[in-house]
Amino acid sequence: METLRERYEQDGVCLCREPAVPAGVVARAVAGMDALMRGEYETGVPPQPSFWKPGDAPQKLVKIEMPQVADRRIMDLIRHPALGRLAADVTGASWVQVWWVQMLVKPSAGSGDGDSPHVGWHQDRQYWQQWEASSHLFTAWVALSDVTSEAGPVRHVRGSHRWGLLDQGNFFTEDFRRQGEQVVIPSGERWEEIEATLPPGGVSFHDQLTLHGSGPNRSGLPRRSFAIHLRTERSRPVADRRQGLTSFIDDPAYCPVIYSA
Ligand SMILES: O=C(O)CCC(=O)C(=O)O
């Protein structure tokens, strides 16, 4: 049978549909998410400045940067050893560190005036210029709700991690289908989407160059997740500088190492 690592290398994405994170850890992290959305910070430390703030419109995408510093229940999920082991299996790494986290809650259509938000097609690498080009960076996207087809799951373009940096993406878009039509892909390649439906506790891994985006949530319930950005021993900030997204990598209270062989 094909291993997760073979699948990841071939497609630039792999899906672990067996819950990797135990249900109790997921339930506590969901309570932590709700606290953050009320502006309550259990540790007394706020998240990093974010696109979303408590009191924003109910149909806006909740996107909170570095939520794990504000709530121990979220940190317990982010640094769960099962995630570290899986990340090492999938990438062959001997060392894995969390270097940035985004909490994402996509409201369902019907929770405000407009439609549910979209996430435009993009490659993460276009936003990660503070890392040296050869750095081995990837993402574990952990579901905390039932991410069905109706919930606006992440969609990945199969094999797009081999297309180089296209630099045409845009995370923030109103219509991901229309925006996707404008992305020019290398000649001879084809656009084939993988739909990352996942149960609570399930996780997908994607490469920093894999094109991905997502459509509206019409499930009737919020789509909840953490995008946990990871690095391996083969990564280095540009000029070894700490700035922007690499500011916290020396601080285990922000950026825990979740696997070491
Ligand atoms: O949650 C989404 O729909 C997109 C997430 C994303 O862009 C990422 O995990 O890198």
Image (cartoon, helix red, strand yellow):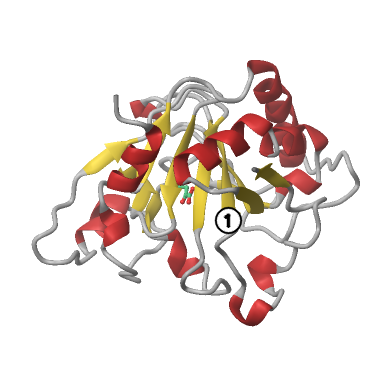
* Label 1: how many Cα within 10 Å (few below 14, some 14–19, many 20+): many
Q: Residue furthest right?
A: 44
Between 107 and 141, the one nearer to me in the picture: 141
Reading the image, the residue beneath label 1 is: 231
Amino acid type, residue under disc 1 in the picture: Arg
Nearest the viewer among 155 and 7 is: 7
Q: Report x, y in % for residue 5.
A: 39, 39
Say whether residue 142 is left or right of residue 11.
right
Is residue 55 placed above or below 243 in the rendered structure? above
Q: Residue furthest bottom?
A: 239
Location of the C terminus (image quadrant): top right
Q: In the displayed structure, does residue 156 sit left or right of residue 67?
A: left
In the image, 176 versus 230, the foreground residue is: 230
Q: How many marks?
A: 1
| Residue 200 visible somewhere in the drawing | yes
For this orientation, the residue located farthest to the left is 188
Up-down relation of residue 87 to residue 102 (above or below): above
Vertical relation: 143 (above or below) 259: above
Q: Is residue 243 above or below residue 31?
A: below
The N terminus - image quarter:
top left
The residue at the point 50 percent across, 27 percent down is: 202
Quarter-of-image position of residue 200: top right
Please tell me which residue is depicted at 64% across the width and 66% down the height of the picture. 245
What is the x, y in percent for residue 2? 30, 30
